[in-house]
Amino acid sequence: MSQTDDNTFNFIAKLEVLTLHSDEARSWLEEFQREESFGWAKKVFQAMVLFRRHEIDRGIQLLDAVDEGLRSSDVEFPSIIHLLRRWHQAALAYYHYLNDDMEQAKLALQSARDEVRKVLSLHIFLIPIATHCIDFRIQLARIARRENRWTEVKRHIETLRRIYADQHPFCVLESGRPIQLSDLREFYLSLPLSEKQREDARFALDTSYPHQDWIDRLEENIFALPDLVIPYP
């Protein structure tokens, strides 16, 4: 299995908890894992690998193909398309960053965050992907650093601290409902998790989890390193 497939399947493993939730959640996961849907996710990740190798033209061609495919894709759950669009827009943000177009990069990240809100508005059982909004904020902080907007960098970091202190939402749904760390904790507590699944969800379940230590290291890296790197979820 390639690095791209490894990263994609690592993400899918995090959604395996859906099999413990409901018949609808299990049907959603089964639909997502079919090649028609899952194949688009893998192509987005392949484009990201190409961007990192500085094969920009090949990467954007692949993203264009994904965009065209998603427009004509017919799936049972529209939220799947929104989730795929989330990845597509995040990859597009990286493309714009590499081309020194910070404004377009920020707009693409905003679109990616909007897609997450749409996903959760359709299916709240997909609440684990609310954590994707953390990545968007990290990338916005890195863009602000590149623009020498230090106050904005600090604001993003402080918002991350508040999110993990359960004082600020990951995101706010179209209905106006905020999704916070305590909501994610409640979701995991409602499921009969295995020991490994409980350990994987420790960041939400354990109220003493050292989030602030992680954010301290992140802050040091953001202030020290100029590059934007969009990690796989």
Image (spheres, grey):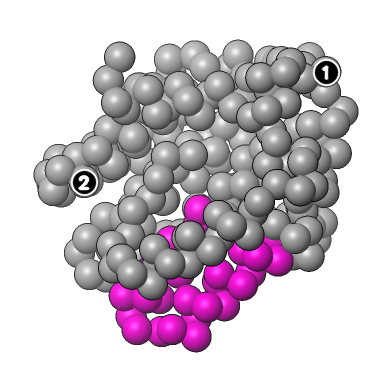
Left or right side of 42 for 129: right
Image x and y of residue 151, in percent:
50, 85
Q: Residues within 10 Å of mark 1 (few under 14, many from 20)?
A: few
The residue shown at (57%, 31%) is 80
Identify the secondary structure beneath mark 2: helix
> Residue 25's x, y, as percent?
73, 22
Q: Position of residue 58 (x, y in %)?
A: 14, 40
Residue type indicated by callout 2: Phe
- Please determine whether, in this image, residue 227 is positioned above or below residue 158: above
Q: Which residues are magenta?
A: 135-163
* Left or right: 166, with 104 as reference point: right
For residue 25, side relative to residue 30 (left or right): right
| Quarter in which the N terminus is drawn | top left
**Label 1 residue SS:** loop
Image point 62% across, 26% down: which residue? 15
Main secondary structure along the magenta-highlighted residues: helix
Q: Is residue 2 magenta?
A: no
State which quadrant residue 106 falls in: bottom left
Q: Disc 1 residue type?
A: Pro
Residue 192 is labelled as 1
Q: Which residue is mark 2?
A: 51
Q: Residue at x 48, y 60 (%)?
A: 217
Residue 122 visible: no
In the rendered picture of this protein, how many numbered marks are placed on residues?
A: 2
Q: Nearer the viewer, mark 2 or mark 1?
A: 1
